[in-house]
Image (tube, coloured by chain):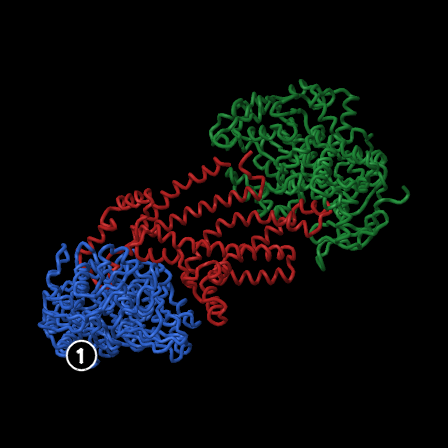
C-alpha cells in the first residue's frame, strides 16, 4: 500500500502543434493507491477528462503529453510504444466512458463488442469459452438474461443497460485500475444510483482502484475516498472527501461546494426541517393561477409494421396550476412525459384531450393568430444553448428576432430593447455585436433567456434550461432567473430531471412517472414528507446525502 | 420484411405508368415527322409515308398511340423499332452490356475509393492525403469525354495495351478500359465521401472505447471504422448508379460499346417512341430496384434500420 | 430571309445572332422591322460551323443581317421544308444513288419533282432534262444535262457550296485500298498480308438487310458486298456488267437484259430472270412499304397508291428479260447497279423478315454464318466461292464493324485494329494526313451540298430574286471556308453535281457566279434593292 498504483507527476498536456499549441494541463500531480477510489471533480474544461485520457494515451485529436510522467505499478507509461500501450489497455487499465449512447458501435451486437474485448485481452480462447465469458461479464455488470441480450444491438438497449455493458467491458479483464469518466451523468438519477452502487460493489470485491471523474461534488463525496478538485488545468485542492466537503480551503472549492445543487438541496432540507415548512395551500393562495392545466392527455400512434399501429398514451390526465409569479417544476425521468406537457403548453403539440388555461383562456381552442399572440406572452428557453442559437447571426440580432417576428418597434427602439435585455441578464452590452461561438455556455444561456424576455412575456417555459451547464454557471443562471422573477413578476414552468435543482429553484413540484402525475405539492412539503414510493426513491438518489455539508 | 419488399415492389407500378406516359409524351411532342426523316433529303411518295405512319400508329392521336403501346407491354410486346427489330430483343441485347460496364465501373472505383479514402482519412493532412486530394480534384474537374479520349488515345493507340474500342469484345475483360474511365468520374466523389465519413467515424466515442478495450489499430480500423464509414457510401451507390447510366452514354459512344446508351441516343434522334420509352422505363425501374437493394443493404449494414421487429 | 418570327428556337437564334457581330443593325435596336437573311439547319448534323461561316461571309459582304437558324434535329427541319412552311433558306444536300448526272438534276429541279424543295420551275430546264432522258447516247444525253445546268446557274434555285470529299485511310496491314465514287472502299481488291479478314468501319443497318428496303449507307455497304447486280460501278463511276451478259437499250423506254448463265446464289440457287423480276415486283408493291420503292416508278405498271404488278418486266427466257418504262429514261441501264435492283433468291419470299436478318446473296461475299450479323456490333462476311464476276475478292473475308462515334473508329485505325475507314472524324482533320502519311485518302465524292432559297420567300421571286441569289452566291468565300472550316476536306462546287460523275465538267457557262466576288455581289444586291429595297 505504500507505493501508489498510479502516480502522475508534473503532467502537462497540450493541444495543437507549433505556434497554435495550447497547454491545457499545467503540471498535474496525483496518486491512486490500490483499492482506493479517487474522484477528480471539476467543471467542463477543467482538464479532469484530459488527465484520465492521458493515462491510457487516448487524448483526442492533436493532444499530446509535453511533460511529466505517469507510472503504473512503477512502469513509466509516457514513453512506451503503441503495442505495449495496446496490451496495457483493457487488461491493466479498464475504462468506462461517459456517454453510453455514443460509446458502443451501433452496427455491432453487444455480444460482439464484449467478446472482442475478451479476445483482445486473451481472457478466453475458443468460440464457446469466449461466449461463456462474455455472458459472465455481462451478468456481473448486472445485466439480467445476458445470454439473450448478447445478440441484441445497442439501440435495443436502454441507457442504463448500455452503461452496464460498458462497465462489464471495462472490468472484463479484472484490471488493477478502472478509469470511470462521468460514467452515469447521462442517466436518470435512480438508474445512476443503482449502477454506481453496483460498480462500487464490484470494485470493492475485486480490490480495483478507481479513478472517478465527475462534475458533481455530491456524487464524488458519496463515492470516493479522496477528492481532487481541478480548475483550469490545475489541481486546486485535494484531500479526503469529507475534509473537502466540510472545510474546503481553496476559494474555488468553497464556491463549488456552495453551488452544488445536490448539496444545496440537502442544506435547504435541513433548514426547512428546522424552521417549519411552507404548505401547498399557502403557495396556491398567494396569487391567482396564470397557467392551469386540466386532465391533459396526449396519445401517439406507434407503428407496428404493416398498416397497424397502436395508441401510446404519453401524457395521461395531468392537471396542475401555477400561481402568478411562482415556479412550478415538472420532474421526472426520461420518458415520463414532462417534455410533452411542456410542448402542449407552448402550443407546439396538439393535446388529445383536456384543457390548458392561460390567464383563464383555453389555449387548446385558439386560432393560429391567437396562438401567435399567445406566444408573445409565453416564451420558451431550451436545454441546448448551442443548438438553439443560429451561429450565423449576431447576439443582437438573435435577441431582437422575436421583436422582428412580432413586428414590434423600429430598428432604433429594438436596439434599445436589446441593450436593456443584455443589462437584465447581466451581460456586457458589447456582446450585441458578437456571435454565439464567441460566448461561453453560460453566456449563451443568458442570451437565450434575454431573447425569451424580449417580448416581455408573463410566462417562461424552461425546458431543462440549466441541465447542460456546469454547477457554478448553473447556480448563477438559477439566481438570475430568481431575480428576474422577483423583478418582472414572471411565472415559470420548469422542466427538469434533476430533483436537486428543483429544491433550489421551484415553489411547486409535480412528479411525473409514465405520463401520470404521481405526486404534487409545495416543494418543501414534498421534500419533507414524500408520500409516494417513487418520489422517495428519487429523493434518495440525490447524491451527497451521506455528507455533512460545509463551507460558508 | 416480406411485406416491406412487396410494398416497395408495388411502388414500381405508378412509377411505370408515370414514366412511360411522360416520356411517351415527350417523344410525341418532339417536332418533325420521324417517318419522313427516314428518307433523308429525298421526299418519299405520300402514299408510302401514310402507310408507314399507319404501321407505327403515328397517324393516331397521342392517347391512342400510348394506349397501343401499353396494351403491347401487357402482352410483353414492347413494340418494334423502325428497323423492324422487337424492342425487347434490343433491350435484352444491350442492357447486359451496359450493366456489366456499370457494375465494373462501380466495383473498380469503389474499391479504390474506399482504400484511398480510408488512408486519406487516417493520414489526414499528410502528404498522402494531399496528393490524393489533388488527383481526385483533377478527376472530378476534367469532363468524362476528355478522360475517355485521353485514355483511348494513350492506352489504345500509343501504348497498345487495350483495343481502342470494344465492339464485339464486350465481355468483362473487354470492357476494362471503358469501365476504368467511367469509374474515374465517380471515383473522386466516392473517395471524398469515404474520407469524410471515415474522419467522422474516427472521431466517434466508440472508436476510443474500442481502443480502451485493448484492441489494436489493425482491428479497430476495419471493424469499428470502415463498416460505419461504408454506410453513407452505400446510400451514395443508388445515386451513383443513376449518374453512371448517364455517363455510360458518353463512354459507350467513344469506346463503341454496344450498350443502351448509344441505342437510346439513336432512337431519340429517330423519334422511335417505343424504343425510347421502353429503354427509359427500364432505366427508371432499374433505378427503383437499385434503390430498394440499397435500402435493404443499408439495413444489413446498420442494424438500427432493420425493417422487422 | 426571315422576319424574326417568335418560334420556339428563339434562344438558339439569339445565340447565332451574337456570332454575326459584323452585321450592321444587328439585334434590332433601331426602329422598324429588321429583315434578316437566315439559313436553317439541323443542329444534330454538325453543320453549325459552316453555316455560321457562310452567313458571316454573306453579312460582311452585303452589309445585311444574316444568321444561322438551328433546328434541334433533322426530322424537325425536314417537316417544315416538306410542308413548305419554312420561312428562311435552308441547307440541302444530295448523295447520288448511281453515278449519273440526271440523278443530281431531274429529281431535284424538274417542275413538280419529288425532292424539288424550293418549288423551282423553269420550262427551259424541264425540256432539256426530258430531252436528255430520251437520248439513248450517253454522251449526247450528258451534253443536254450540262445545258440544263447552265439554266440552273442563271436561276440559282439552290446556292451550290461544295462537294463533300471522302476522307478516309487504311491500316498498315492492308494494301491496294481504293475508294470508289460512292465513298466506299473497293473491298474486293484489298489485300492483307497476314491473310486474315479485312476490317472496315460501318454503322448498324437501320432496316433489315433487304435490298429494296435499304436506303442508308449502313445497310447499303453490306448489301453491296453480299449481292451482285446487273452492273457494277467502277471507281470512276462508269457501269460495267456484272450479272448481266448484256444490256441493250432498244429505245428510250425499252431495255433488254441478258444474264450470264450458271451464276448462283450462295445457297446454290441459280440466278435467273425470275429472281430479278420477283425481287423488283416485291420492292415496288405498295403494300410492302419498301423504302426504295421509288426506284421502280419509271417501270410500266408501277403504282405508288395501290398494289399493282410491274407489267413492264417480261421474262423472255430464264436468262433474258425486257424492261419497258412508262417514260423515257435513257440512263435506266446506268441505274441498275444500285442496291434496289439486286436479285433475290426464291427462299427470300418464304419469310422476308427472316431473310432480312440472314440474307443470302449472289455477291462476292456472304454472311460468314447464320447470325453473323451481331446487331450494333459488327457483321462478319466470308468470301462467296460461288461468285463469278469482276469483283472476285483478293482477301479472305470482310468484317464490317459498327461504330457509334468515328473518333473511336479513327483510334482503332491508328492502332491498326481497323483496316479501312471511310469517315475520318472532324476532330482529326488537322492531323490525319500527318498521322497516316500515304495511307490517308482525301478525294471528291458524289455528295453535293448547298442551301435552298425558295422562290416563295419575299424578295426572292422573279428578277429581284435572281439578282439576290447571285449576290449571295458571290458573297460566299467557298475556298476559304473549305480550307479553314473543313481543312480541305470539301471541294468548292463549280456546278450542281459532283466531279466523280461521268460527264462532269468544270467549264459550264455562267459558273463564275459560284466564285467569290464581293464587289460584284454588292453591285447585284444594290441592283436588287432598286427593284425593292431590302428592309
Residue A86 position within the rendered picture, expressed as x and y whole percent measured from the top left: 75, 50
* Label 1: how many Cα within 10 Å (few below 14, some 14–19, many 20+): some
Q: What is the quadrant of residue B120 in the picture? A: bottom right
Of all residues, the one furthest to the right in this rendering is A2
Q: Is residue C31 visible?
A: yes
Image quadrant holding the N terminus of chain C, namely bottom left
Colour chosen for chain A = green
In the rendered image, the vertical position of residue A96 relative to residue A64, given as above or below: above
Residue at x 65% of width, y 33% of height: A148
Q: Give the side of residue A232 with respect to residue C486, left or right.
A: right
Q: What is the quadrant of residue C287 in the picture? A: bottom left
Tell me the chain of label 1.
C
Colour chosen for chain B = red
Colour chosen for chain C = blue
Residue B114 position within the rendered picture, expressed as x and y whole percent measured from the top left: 58, 54
Residue at x 42% of width, y 40% of height: B11
Q: Is residue A480 visible?
A: no
Image quadrant holding the C terminus of chain C, namely bottom left
Amino acid at each position: 500500500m505504500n507505493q501508489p498504483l498510479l502516480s502522475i507527476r508534473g503532467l502537462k498536456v497540450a493541444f495543437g502543434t507549433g505556434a497554435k499549441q495550447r497547454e491545457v494541463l499545467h503540471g498535474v500531480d496525483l496518486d491512486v493507491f490500490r483499492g482506493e477510489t479517487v474522484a477528480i471533480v471539476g467543471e467542463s474544461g477543467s482538464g479532469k477528462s484530459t488527465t484520465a485520457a492521458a493515462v491510457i494515451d487516448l487524448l483526442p485529436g492533436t493532444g499530446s503529453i509535453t511533460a511529466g510522467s505517469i507510472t503504473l505499478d512503477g512502469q513509466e507509461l509516457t514513453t512506451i510504444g503503441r503495442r505495449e500501450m495496446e496490451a496495457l489497455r483493457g487488461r491493466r487499465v479498464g475504462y468506462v466512458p461517459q456517454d453510453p449512447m455514443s460509446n458502443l458501435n451501433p452496427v455491432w451486437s453487444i455480444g460482439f463488442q464484449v467478446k472482442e474485448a475478451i479476445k483482445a485481452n486473451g481472457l478466453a480462447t475458443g468460440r464457446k469459452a469466449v461466449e461463456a465469458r462474455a455472458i459472465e461479464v455481462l451478468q456481473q455488470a448486472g445485466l439480467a438474461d445476458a445470454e439473450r441480450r448478447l445478440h441484441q444491438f445497442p439501440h435495443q438497449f436502454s441507457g442504463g443497460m448500455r452503461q452496464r455493458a460498458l462497465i462489464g467491458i471495462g472490468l472484463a479483464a479484472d484490471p488493477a485500475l478502472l478509469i470511470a469518466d462521468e460514467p452515469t451523468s447521462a442517466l436518470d438519477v435512480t438508474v445512476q444510483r443503482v449502477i454506481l452502487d453496483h460498480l462500487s460493489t464490484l470494485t470493492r470485491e475485486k480490490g480495483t482502484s478507481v479513478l472517478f471523474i465527475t462534475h458533481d461534488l455530491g456524487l464524488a463525496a458519496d463515492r470516493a475516498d479522496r477528492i481532487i478538485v481541478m480548475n483550469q488545468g490545475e489541481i486546486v485542492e485535494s484531500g479526503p472527501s469529507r475534509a473537502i466537503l466540510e472545510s474546503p480551503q481553496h476559494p474555488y472549492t468553497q464556491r463549488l461546494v456552495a453551488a452544488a445543487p445536490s448539496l444545496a438541496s440537502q442544506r435547504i432540507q435541513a433548514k426547512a426541517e428546522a424552521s417549519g415548512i411552507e404548505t401547498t395551500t399557502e403557495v396556491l393562495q398567494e396569487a391567482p393561477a396564470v397557467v392551469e392545466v386540466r386532465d391533459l392527455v396526449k396519445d401517439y400512434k406507434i407503428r407496428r409494421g404493416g398498416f397497424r399501429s397502436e395508441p401510446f398514451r404519453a401524457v395521461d390526465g395531468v392537471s396542475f396550476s401555477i400561481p402568478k409569479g411562482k415556479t412550478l417544476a415538472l420532474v421526472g425521468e426520461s420518458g415520463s412525459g414532462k417534455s410533452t406537457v411542456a410542448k402542449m403548453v407552448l402550443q407546439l403539440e396538439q393535446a388529445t384531450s383536456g384543457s390548458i388555461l392561460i390567464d383563464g383562456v383555453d389555449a387548446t381552442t385558439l386560432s393560429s393568430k391567437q396562438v401567435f399572440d399567445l406566444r408573445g406572452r409565453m416564451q420558451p428557453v431550451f436545454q441546448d444553448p448551442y443548438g438553439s442559437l443560429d451561429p450565423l447571426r449576431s447576439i443582437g440580432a438573435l435577441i431582437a428576432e422575436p421583436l422582428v417576428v412580432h413586428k414590434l418597434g423600429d430598428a432604433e427602439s429594438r436596439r434599445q430593447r436589446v441593450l436593456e435585455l443584455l443589462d437584465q441578464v447581466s451581460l456586457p452590452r458589447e456582446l450585441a455585436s458578437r456571435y454565439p461561438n464567441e460566448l461561453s455556455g453560460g453566456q449563451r444561456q443568458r442570451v437565450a433567456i434575454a431573447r425569451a424576455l424580449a417580448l416581455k412575456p408573463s410566462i417562461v417555459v424552461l425546458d431543462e434550461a440549466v441541465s447542460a451547464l456546469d454547477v457554478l454557471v448553473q447556480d448563477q443562471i438559477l439566481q438570475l432567473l430568481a431575480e428576474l422573477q422577483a423583478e418582472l413578476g414572471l411565472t415559470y414552468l420548469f422542466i427538469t430531471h434533476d430533483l436537486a435543482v428543483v429544491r433550489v429553484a421551484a415553489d411547486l413540484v409535480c412528479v411525473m412517472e409514465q405520463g401520470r402525475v404521481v405526486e404534487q405539492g409545495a416543494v418543501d412539503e414534498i421534500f419533507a414528507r414524500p408520500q409516494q414510493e417513487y418520489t422517495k426513491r428519487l429523493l434518495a438518489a440525490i447524491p451527497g446525502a451521506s455528507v455533512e455539508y460545509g463551507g460558508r | 420484411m416480406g411485406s416491406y419488399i412487396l410494398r416497395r415492389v408495388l411502388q414500381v407500378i405508378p412509377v411505370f405508368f408515370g414514366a412511360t406516359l411522360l416520356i411517351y409524351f415527350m417523344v410525341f411532342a418532339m417536332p418533325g415527322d420521324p417517318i419522313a426523316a427516314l428518307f433523308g433529303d429525298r421526299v418519299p411518295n405520300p402514299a408510302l409515308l401514310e402507310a408507314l405512319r399507319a404501321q407505327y400508329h403515328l397517324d393516331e392521336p397521342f392517347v391512342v398511340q400510348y394506349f397501343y403501346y401499353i396494351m403491347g407491354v401487357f402482352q410483353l410486346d414492347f413494340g418494334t423499332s423502325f428497323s423492324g427489330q422487337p424492342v425487347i430483343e434490343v433491350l435484352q441485347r444491350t442492357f447486359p452490356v451496359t450493366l456489366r460496364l456499370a457494375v465494373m465501373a462501380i466495383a473498380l472505383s469503389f474499391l479504390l475509393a474506399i482504400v484511398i479514402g480510408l488512408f486519406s482519412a487516417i493520414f489526414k493532412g499528410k502528404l498522402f492525403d494531399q496528393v490524393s486530394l489533388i488527383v481526385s480534384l483533377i478527376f472530378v474537374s476534367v469532363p468524362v469525354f476528355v478522360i475517355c479520349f485521353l485514355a483511348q488515345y494513350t492506352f489504345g493507340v500509343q501504348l497498345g495495351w487495350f483495343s481502342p474500342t470494344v465492339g464485339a469484345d464486350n465481355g468483362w475483360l473487354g470492357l476494362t478500359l471503358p469501365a476504368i474511365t467511367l469509374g474515374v468520374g465517380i471515383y473522386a466523389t466516392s473517395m471524398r465521401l469515404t474520407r469524410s465519413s471515415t474522419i467522422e467515424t474516427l472521431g466517434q466515442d466508440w472508436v476510443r472505447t474500442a481502443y480502451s478495450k485493448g484492441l489494436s489499430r489493425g482491428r479497430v480500423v476495419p471493424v469499428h471504422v470502415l463498416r460505419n464509414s461504408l454506410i453513407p457510401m452505400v446510400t451514395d451507390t443508388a445515386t451513383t448508379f443513376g449518374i453512371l447510366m448517364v455517363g455510360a452514354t458518353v463512354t459507350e459512344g467513344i469506346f463503341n460499346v454496344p450498350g443502351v446508351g448509344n441505342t437510346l441516343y439513336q432512337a431519340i434522334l429517330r423519334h422511335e417512341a417505343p424504343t425510347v420509352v421502353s429503354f427509359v422505363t427500364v432505366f427508371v425501374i432499374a433505378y427503383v430496384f437499385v434503390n430498394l437493394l440499397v435500402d435493404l443493404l443499408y439495413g444489413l449494414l446498420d442494424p438500427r434500420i432493420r425493417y422487422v421487429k | 430571309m426571315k422576319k424574326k418570327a417568335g418560334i420556339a428556337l428563339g434562344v438558339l437564334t439569339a445565340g447565332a445572332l451574337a456570332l454575326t457581330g459584323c452585321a450592321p443593325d444587328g439585334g434590332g435596336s433601331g426602329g422598324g422591322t429588321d429583315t434578316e437573311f437566315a439559313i436553317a439547319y439541323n443542329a444534330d448534323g454538325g453543320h453549325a460551323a459552316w453555316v455560321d461561316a457562310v452567313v458571316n461571309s454573306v453579312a460582311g459582304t452585303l452589309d445585311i443581317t444574316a444568321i444561322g437558324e438551328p433546328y434541334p434535329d433533322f426530322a424537325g427541319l425536314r417537316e417544315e421544308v416538306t410542308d413548305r412552311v419554312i420561312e428562311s433558306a435552308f441547307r440541302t444536300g444530295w448523295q447520288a444513288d448511281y453515278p449519273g448526272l440526271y440523278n443530281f438534276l431531274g429529281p431535284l429541279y424538274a417542275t413538280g419533282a419529288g425532292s424539288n424543295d424550293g418549288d423551282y420551275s423553269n420550262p427551259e430546264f424541264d425540256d432539256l432534262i426530258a430531252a436528255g432522258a430520251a437520248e439513248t447516247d450517253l454522251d449526247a444525253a450528258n451534253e443536254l444535262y450540262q445545258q440544263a445546268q447552265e439554266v440552273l446557274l442563271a436561276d440559282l434555285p439552290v446556292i451550290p457550296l461544295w462537294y463533300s470529299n471522302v476522307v478516309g485511310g487504311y491500316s498498315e496491314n492492308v494494301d491496294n485500298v481504293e475508294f470508289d465514287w460512292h465513298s466506299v472502299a473497293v473491298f474486293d481488291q484489298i489485300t492483307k498480308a497476314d491473310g486474315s479478314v479485312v476490317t472496315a468501319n460501318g454503322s448498324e443497318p437501320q432496316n433489315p438487310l433487304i435490298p429494296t428496303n435499304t436506303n442508308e449507307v449502313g445497310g447499303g455497304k453490306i448489301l453491296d458486298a453480299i449481292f451482285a447486280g446487273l452492273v457494277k460501278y467502277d471507281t470512276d463511276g462508269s457501269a460495267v456488267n456484272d450479272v448481266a451478259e448484256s444490256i441493250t437499250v432498244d429505245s428510250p423506254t425499252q431495255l433488254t437484259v441478258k444474264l450470264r448463265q450458271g451464276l448462283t446464289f450462295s445457297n446454290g440457287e441459280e440466278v435467273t430472270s425470275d429472281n430479278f423480276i420477283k425481287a423488283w415486283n416485291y420492292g415496288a408493291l405498295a403494300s410492302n412499304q419498301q423504302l426504295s420503292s421509288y426506284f421502280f416508278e419509271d417501270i410500266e405498271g408501277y403504282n405508288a397508291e395501290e398494289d399493282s404488278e410491274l407489267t413492264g418486266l417480261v421474262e423472255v427466257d430464264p436468262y433474258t428479260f425486257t424492261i419497258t418504262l412508262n417514260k423515257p429514261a435513257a440512263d435506266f441501264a446506268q441505274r441498275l447497279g444500285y442496291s434496289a435492283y439486286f436479285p433475290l433468291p426464291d427462299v427470300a419470299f418464304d419469310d422476308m423478315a427472316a431473310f432480312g436478318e440472314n440474307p443470302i446473296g449472289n455477291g462476292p461475299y456472304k454472311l460468314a454464318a447464320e447470325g453473323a450479323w451481331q446487331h450494333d456490333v459488327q457483321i462478319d462476311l466470308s468470301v462467296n466461292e460461288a461468285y463469278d464476276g469482276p469483283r472476285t475478292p483478293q482477301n479472305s473475308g470482310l468484317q464490317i464493324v459498327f461504330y457509334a462515334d468515328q473518333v473511336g473508329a479513327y483510334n482503332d485505325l491508328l492502332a491498326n485494329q481497323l483496316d479501312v475507314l471511310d469517315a475520318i472524324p472532324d476532330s482529326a482533320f488537322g492531323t490525319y494526313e500527318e498521322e497516316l502519311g500515304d495511307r490517308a485518302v482525301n478525294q471528291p465524292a458524289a455528295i453535293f451540298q448547298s442551301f435552298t432559297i425558295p422562290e416563295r420567300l419575299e424578295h426572292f421571286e422573279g428578277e429581284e430574286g435572281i439578282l439576290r441569289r447571285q449576290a449571295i452566291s458571290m458573297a460566299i468565300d467557298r475556298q476559304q471556308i473549305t480550307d479553314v472550316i473543313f481543312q480541305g476536306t470539301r471541294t468548292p462546287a463549280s456546278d450542281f453535281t459532283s466531279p466523280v460523275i461521268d460527264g462532269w465538267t468544270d467549264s459550264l457557262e455562267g459558273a463564275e457566279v459560284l466564285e467569290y466576288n464581293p464587289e460584284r455581289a454588292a453591285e447585284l444586291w444594290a441592283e436588287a434593292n432598286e427593284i425593292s429595297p431590302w428592309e
